[in-house]
Image (tube, helix red, strand yellow):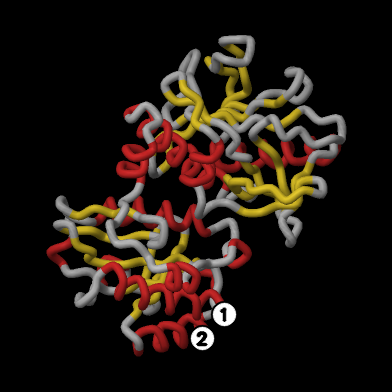
Amino acid sequence: MQIVFEEDEVTKGFGLLRKCLRAGLGKPTSIPWSFPGHGTSDSTLPTWSEETAHGHLTVGVGEEGDWDSRTPVLIALEAAYDRISPVVEVNVPATDDEPDRQVGGCFARDADKRWWLCHRGSVFTASGARIPKEAIHRYFQKWLVEVDDDGRRTDVIPIARLDEDEFAIGLRRFAEAVGRLKEVWGNHDGNDTGVDRDLGWRDDINFPDEIERATSDRKASYDYRHGPIQQTLQEYLRGVLAKGFRVALNARLDLAILRKGSIAAIFEVKTALGNQLYAGIGQLLVYRQVFSPGETPPLFLVVPADVGDDAVVEATTTLLESIGITLVLQNGEEFVLGDGRDLRDAFDPTWLR
């Protein structure tokens, strides 16, 4: 993936972005936004707003050239109203054909020439305090992708592909994740221990160095869908599980279902088969042994639905079943088993709402 900073290309990126918003959220209206901290407290922007299946999404986008250093892209998770405040700003630098790494947002193109809206994760503000880049990148570690930043190697957060069908979903996932980070950061005044406890489950068991190395994925093995799939799965599980269950993650486990302090199920997310399939099998088996010694919580390998054709999915499902792992396919907001049944069918009925 490569950062785009040439003026003509950035203009093209905004054209694609607005096209995606029209396709997903309809026609824009002019709405005053309140976003203090940039020299002006209010600005009226073309704004797209729609109630989706998962709640309201409102997006304001500035006009290129109206700001000295940036063009704002503002995201809120409520219906539009006068002086609405964003959950997060994804400001794209005003360009003179030179990269500006001081502004958080950017456009990028991947190896298949697909366009993405990204964020450098440089800083967010919560309760008047700045959340530092280190903490943001730690929270978004499963989203991060290394990019070519005009000859430098830089980690960015891919927010959403400029694709008419998926763009609004990507914006919502990112805004919800940022909102959760800001909420917890503010509640704990930036205290790392409290923030880590509330954002993700941390187990007292420490990985031995040998296991840590053996189960560590190289960043190159991920692509930009890993973090969003992980977050969407977490939202799905929280929506279907009964009271008393917790869905959380830690530095190693992509997701686990917890009940009464024990692991009830373990999930590993992969974005392809091949080498990632082998890594996923190994990780699941090792994680169960290390985190649940003497117990056998069910294991789930989660991949996007477009990972292969029907024959590949069937063969992979059969292979994984033979070693006690269930294949799960992610399709948008839904998760199904290799045979087409809903993921809920793999759970004990007493687990469900």
Which residue is label 1 attached to?
274
Real-space Cα separation, disc 1 to disc 2, in angstroms: 15 Å
Residue drawn at (37%, 79%), measured in percent from left and top?
Answer: 339
Which residue is label 2 attached to?
311
Residue 240 locus on image (x, y percent): 25, 56
Residue 116 locus on image (x, y percent): 66, 48
Disc 1: CA contacts within 10 A as few (<14), some (14-19) or many (>=20): few
Does 217 appear above or below 59?
Answer: below
Residue drawn at (53%, 74%), measured in percent from left and top?
Answer: 276
Residue 181 or residue 208, whichever sits in front? 208
Q: Mark 1 or mark 2: which comes first in sequence?
A: 1
- Look at the image and tell me whether residue 329 can be seen: no
Left or right: residue 11 versus residue 61 is: right
Residue drawn at (78%, 21%), measured in percent from left and top?
Answer: 65
Left or right: residue 75 versus residue 184 is: right
Disc 2: CA contacts within 10 A as few (<14), some (14-19) or many (>=20): few
Does 117 appear above or below 346?
Answer: above
Residue 113 or residue 226, whichever sits in front? 226
Residue 332 locus on image (x, y percent): 46, 57
